[in-house]
Image (cartoon, rainbow, N blue to C red):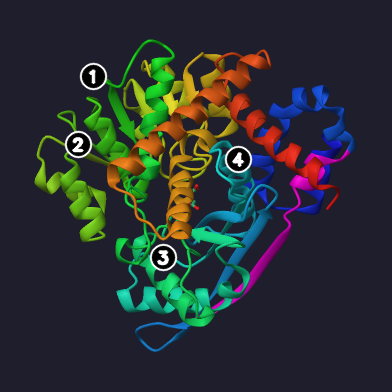
Amino acid sequence: MNEVLDAVRAKNPEQREFHQAVDEVFHSIQPVLDRHPEFRRAKVFERLVEPERQVMFRVAWTDDRGEVQVNRGFRVQFSSVIGPYKGGLRFHPSVSLGVVKFLGFEQILKNALTGLPMGGAKGGADFDPKGKSEGEVMRFCQAFATELWRHIGADTDVPAGDIGVGGREVGFMAGQYRRLANRWDGTFTGKGLSFGGSLVRTEATGYGLLYFTEEMLRARNESMQGKSVVVSGSGNVSIYAVQKAQQLGAKVVAMSDSDGFVHDPTGIRLDTIRDIKEVRRGRIREYCDRHQEAKYTPGRGLWRLSCDVALPCATQNELDGDDALALIKNGCKVVAEGANMPCTPEAVHAFLEHRLAFGPAKAANAGGVATSGLEMQQNSMRESWSFADVDRRLMQIMKNVHATCASTAAQYGKPGNLVDGANIAGFHKVAQAMLAQGVM
Ligand code: GLU
């Protein structure tokens, strides 16, 4: 069966992150293929690794100096077998076809785990929002949506945010979509509250991550109360992960951005972080200007701090094998992934070998897309639910995702291995749907 992986490599050269995502799932699902020879016969995995459709396009726009800029846009519509394509858009200079495909592939299984009818997709552009004016961001988003709109729709493909794409960018794209399509429908999620957005969507990935982490701890008869926590990143996922961790009685001692990290042994003051990151779009080092007890360190030494719980919420492959060993040595007991694939395969291996509680991204960060699913439901019903109502549904979904992963892992003789649990449960659901719908 390693032929399958060789074929993926040969057909998709240089898509390193995509290979990594496929390898991981492939290794988990061998026992499912053994139990279900019909999946093997129908070449379900071989079909799943080939996206149903991929779009790559030019995005040309004019910057504030009047200079023409050209970026590359992507939308990879990976699988619509259990629902309309669904997944975020990432605007970051590192975005390439390989990165979008790794994200899209993970999204298929993540969305399946939520229990909601959503297929998997991902998109984005190699546009760098850093240092761009509001007008430049708007013109870029409009140019991007001018091509994207013909490929999407409320029952076809529903994009949302990811790194570099938040409420502001979704607003610009949803507006341009509405103008071109001449329809108001729920084609984007993560919209503003005045035009069909859902309460809790902003907080959802971070809150969901903590609901999932609480479940992991509960399985060990523990809770977040009194735990010391390190969270990487300071974007949307990190901020609301910190907020919920603090609400649950934990102490968050460090956060980071792409330049370095702040360590505040007295506990991170989230309003300062939010002012720096959400209001002024500044750098995290500014935190120390306001809090003398905190220390800023440039570079990536964050995972050398000691903590009970580590929550990588920044980006792919930000936590490697050496970082994992340092965390383990310093007494860390729980790791849950808020970002997509933040831990390298070596790091994941170390965590599982040392019997840490490890929550893989496609389960632990499913709260974001799950709440997007709730936004789609509200849009279809022309309703808006209260914060408490959406939050309660999100919490229930995260509990279900954890229970599904844990019981699947146990069923396949891997108790406590949520990586295999998530991959097997997600794959099994998608594979069954593919089998039922015939060869395509
Ligand atoms: N980008 C988020 C993720 O990785 C959310 C996607 C969505 O809401 O569609 O799951």
Q: Which residues are magenta?
A: 42-60
Measure the alpha-carbon separation of dots 4 and 3.
Answer: 24 Å
Q: Nearer the viewer, mark 3 or mark 1?
A: 3
> Residue sitting at 37 percent across and 10 percent down?
221
Q: Which mark is residue 268?
A: 2
Q: Please tell me whether mark 1 sits on a helix, a strand or a loop.
A: loop
Q: Amino acid at mark 4?
A: Ala
Up/down of 390 relative to 194, above or below = above
Mark 4 touches mark 3? (CB < 8 Å):
no
Q: Please tell me whether mark 4 sits on a helix, a strand or a loop.
A: helix
Left or right relative to 34: residue 369? left
Residue at which label 4 appears: 112
Q: Amino acid at mark 3?
A: Val
Q: Is 45 a magenta residue?
A: yes
Measure the alpha-carbon separation of dots 2 and 4.
Answer: 35 Å
Q: Residue 212, position in %: x, y?
A: 42, 29
Q: Residue 348, position in %: x, y?
A: 55, 27
> Residue sitting at 40 percent across and 26 percent down?
213
Residue at which label 3 appears: 170
Measure the alpha-carbon separation of dots 1 and 4.
Answer: 33 Å
Q: Quadrant of residue 123?
A: bottom right
Q: Please tell me whether mark 3 sits on a helix, a strand or a loop.
A: helix
Q: Amino acid at mark 1?
A: Gly
Q: Residue 256, position in %: x, y?
A: 31, 43
Mark 3 touches mark 2? (CB < 8 Å):
no
Q: Please tell me whether mark 2 sits on a helix, a strand or a loop.
A: loop
